[in-house]
Amino acid sequence: MANSPQAKKRARQNERRFAVNKARRSRIRTYLRKVEEAIASGDQTAAAAALKEAQPELMRGVTKGVLHKNTASRKMSRLASRVKGMGA
């Protein structure tokens, strides 16, 4: 348990940051799920549109510190290759 005033303040801040980051992660996962569902349905145009919507959301997660840059790039690359492969 936090005893000093500074430690108490940090604990409060950590709770707030945790809630914000949790919401951001959830939002990112929702966009990724939409891409996955579009790929599963076999509709390439819908999958490409969903991917286009998901990309800025992933990068926003990077700038906000929720995701590592390489993680977001890897996810985007893998999804893009799957969407591209649907047409072949």
Image (spheres, rainbow, N blue to C red):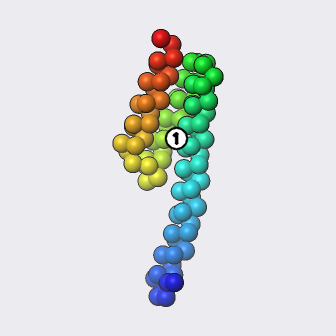
Residue ranking furthest to the bottom: 3
Residue 62 in percent (x, y) is at 43, 47
- What number of labels is visible? 1
Residue ranking furthest to the front: 40
Residue 7 in percent (x, y) is at 46, 81
- Residue at 59% of width from left, 53% of height from top? 23
Residue ranking furthest to the left: 70
Residue 20 in percent (x, y) is at 56, 58
Q: Nearer the viewer, residue 34 or 16?
A: 34
- Residue at 61% of width from left, 18% of height from top? 43
Q: Is residue 78 left or right of residue 35?
A: left
Relative to 88, say whether 55 is above or below. Answer: below
Residue ranking furthest to the top: 88
Q: Amino acid at mark 1?
A: Glu
- Residue at 36% of width from left, 42% of height from top? 70
Callout 1: SS: helix
Residue 78 in percent (x, y) is at 43, 30
Label 1: few (<14), some (14–19) or many (≥20) C-alpha neighbours in 10 Å:
some
- Residue at 57% of width from left, 18% of height from top? 44
* Residue wearing tag 1: 57
Can residue 64 be seen from the camera position used here?
A: no
Relative to 41, say whether 54 is above or below. Answer: below
Can residue 31 be seen from the camera position used here?
A: yes
